[in-house]
Amino acid sequence: MPGACPHFVFACFKRVERWADRLTGAAGPFFVAIATLLFIIGTLCFLDVILPSIAWPWLSTLPCLLIILNLFAHYYFACMVSPGFASDPPPRTGNGFIWAKKRQTPHRPLTNGVRWSANLNITPASTSRCAKCGGSKPERTHHCRVCNRCVLKYDHHCPVGINQCVGLHNERHFALFMAYVVIATFCFTALGWPHLFVALGFNFNDEWEHRMSPVVFSIIYFLCLVMCLAVGTMFTWHLWGVAVGETAVESQDHEHYQQVAQSRGEIFQNSYDLGKFKNLQLFFNLGPDGYPIYTLLFPFRILPYTDGRSWARKPGLERHHGIYVGEELTDEEDN
Ligand SMILES: [Zn+2]
Ligand SMILES: [Zn+2]
């Protein structure tokens, strides 16, 4: 029967993919537990071995403790704050001390789902229906195969790092978590190398006089070195995406749109791209209409600038330029 074989291969592939998704989902908590344990051991190594030897302890101790606090808090929030599901009502700003306070009007009410007012071209998101869960799907929402739900401003599902999706409501914590991993591991490797020499026995003048085992310290040191390079690369790539106004999925889609537009002699324009500075401001919700810049230094909770049902767009654009209605890629295409 012609055509039966590709069908069979495709069905097998789908089955393998579903099993892989299930396995990914099941292994998630295990990865998070391992990561938490490594962060705790790393912190103990730092507090026991490196911190007592730093110059000007009265000046350096507080910033070091702040970096550790941010690292753990943003990791906790990235894992625990819901990425924002399209079927859930928009969350409200809390009142506790963990919620950052706005510079001017505290708790500005949502206007068309957006907390910013000044000089932004805000348009309501177009909505479609998800072919997989049947829910309403505002623009920039994607269906996650592992979570089996529609996630607002879906970036990617992160099984190894945080065991859930990165979306509208936890993307700020996820980005800051990566930033603090890079800062923390950089400080560890930059300040810890004299201790590594002693731990490995290369320094014959000094004895290892710490409670932490030299073997554990050496392993953590090399892990920090690898993490600093690996997460540093990931973070740079992620931040570049934020700066050009696209998520991980959108960066793939936009490559396709560019080709489609080019084949017609047109130039594709991403309507979510308001310029690098504004894109970063909106992502971190900073600026005159958002929160003060010091909120990047403390592990505050902050709601995104939009509820995911409206988007700020490049002035003069109501939708992407160079791609027509019906040409946009959808999640259904991987069916
Ligand atoms: Zn869905
Ligand atoms: Zn997911």
Image (cartoon, rainbow, N blue to C red):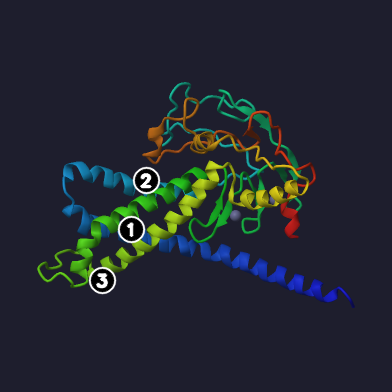
Q: Is residue 81 at least partly visible in the picture? A: no
Q: Residues within 10 Å of mark 1 (few under 14, many from 20)?
A: some
Three-letter amino acid code at the position of disc 2: Asn
Q: Earlier in the sequence, mark 2 or mark 3?
A: 2
- Of 224 and 109, the residue lying toward us: 224
What residue is drawn where x is 53% and y is 33%?
A: 278
Mark 1 vs mark 3: give the one in front. 3
- Of 118 and 159, the residue lying toward us: 118
Q: Is residue 260 at least partly visible in the picture? A: yes
Contact? badges 2 and 3 (CB < 8 Å):
no
Q: Quadrant of the C terminus?
A: bottom right
**Residue positioned most to the bottom:** 1
Q: Residues within 10 Å of mark 2 (few under 14, many from 20)?
A: many
Q: Residue 175, image x and y in percent? A: 47, 47
Q: For mark 1, what is the residue?
A: 40
C-alpha gap between disc 2 and disc 3: 27 Å
Q: For mark 2, what is the residue?
A: 70
Three-letter amino acid code at the position of disc 1: Ile
Ligand 2 resides in the quarter of the picture at bottom right
Q: Residue 207, image x and y in percent? A: 12, 68
What residue is drawn where x is 70% and y is 42%?
A: 267
Residue 215 marker: 3
